[in-house]
Image (tube, rainbow, N blue to C red):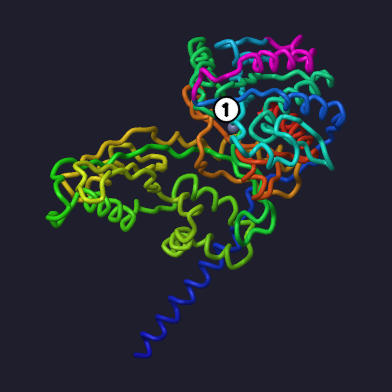
Amino acid sequence: MKIIFISIGFIFLIFIVVTIFNTFTTKSVQPTAEPTDISIDQEAALKRFSTALTYQTISYQDRTKFNFEEFDQFITLLEESYPEVHQQLEREKVNQYSLIYLWKGTDSTQKPIGFTSHYDVVPVLEGTENNWEQPPFSGNVVDGVIWGRGTLDDKLGVIGLLEAVDYLLEQDYQPTRDVYFMFGFDEEIGGDQGAKAIVETLKNRGVTFEFILDEGGAIVENMVPGVSNPVGVVGISEKGSATAELMIEGSGGHSSQPEDRTNIGRIARAIARLEEKQFKADLRGPGEELFEYVAPEMNFGMKYVFANKFLFEPIIEKILLQQPASAAMIRTTIAPTIFQAGEQYNALPEKATAFVNLRIMPGEPLEEVKDFIVDTIDDKGIKVSISGSEASNVSSSNSKAFQSIQQAARNVYGDVVIAPYLMFAGSDAKHYEAISENTYRFLPVKLTSEDLQRMHGTNEQISIENYINAIKFYVEMIRLSNKM
Ligand SMILES: [Zn+2]
């Protein structure tokens, strides 16, 4: 008996030693910040951005509603605002409104690098115009804040990048690699004529990139529990988006003598079964990498848990599943969005349909997702079909490009933690997969959760400080990635 006690005590001691050892050997993977020396002419940069925001370059689902005059004028404005850029770089139009700028490097044997953004914006929802504190296309600057549709999504990217090039040209900087800047005009409706066409054009020329940087995650305070510094997240993959249709037909009839199982009842049961079971949660891929990057920055308790993930994984997953936002990071999500059946209160509908929107984890083919649904609902009478897109590839967070993003962000923002993550929203970046092994999604600004809600909503805005810092980030990023 005594021997058993001793050996249990011994095992427990080893357990403590190993887990504590793991905790203390978890080292930060953040590069040391080298504070930036860039000084931007704020007033001039502000005026150019402000003017760019007054153009109503709106994307509509219905392409016939596009007002291309505004797009044309916006392109002219870019030429007028950045004469030096237009003189030194080659500019090309694809589908008339997409723009490719090529800045020739000194060494064409190296792979080029690419920055992408879009200058179309989402419409202002009808009836909400008056809720704006400053008109949405005013570009007004009030109390250190720039107002307008596109301040964050994503004229910031277009103007921020051109400002960065303008600054570097003034400094007589010359890149080593060829640097491409690619601006789409229909990202908000999928980018088919913009980013996709740009990619086709470059692909036909055999251009492939070392990396592509697009919009995406931002730096947010209090984002990760247990981490006191703001965390900036760089999307290394985006989830797929698909819709499953569940449909049952036949056996209508009078409501006075229903069968035990009606069409509505069966579709409802199918949905209930899906919600009950859910897709399998698994902390892997970009979600897992996020924690590998933030764990070293956590307080002792959290660090202890994440440094010993091999032990605590089930507990971590349980915690993540408690909040929809963190649950979406580790599993394919199910969202029933449309339910259609019946017209008359005393007649059983002959047909019932439900649509379920799915956000799919990387590495899960549509066929597998469909099989899971069919197996789970377990009703042969219900026809299941699925359409949409799978998740993107997963880019490397160990690349020099990723390290450059970290370095550039820390040079500008100081003690922020930069980590990879899985993006839920779609972006133009997915199109670039065809010509770049690594695509990163990062918006170099420090935001609050309120800012994030304003992005496609009312009162979209950005602080002057963020705007200037975004320019500095792009300058740093162009310089650093040319040293890779
Ligand atoms: Zn966008």
Q: Quadrant of the image for the C terminus?
A: top right
| 302 to 82, vertically: above or below | below
| 176 to 2, vertically: above or below | above
Residue 238 can be seen, yes or no: yes
* Identity of the residue drawn at 46% across and 45% down: 285
Q: Position of residue 463 (x, y in %)?
A: 77, 41
* Residue 426 colored in magenta in the image: no
| 72 to 148, vertically: above or below | above
Mark 1 = which residue? 211
What's under tag 1, amino acid-wise? Phe
Disc 1 is placed on an element classified as loop
* Residue 73 colored in magenta in the image: yes
Residue 480 can be seen, yes or no: no
Q: Position of residue 399 (x, y in %)?
A: 57, 35
The residues colored magenta run 62-90
Ligand 1 appears in which quadrant? top right
Q: Position of residue 25 (x, y in %)?
A: 59, 59
Q: Quadrant of the image for the N terminus?
A: bottom left
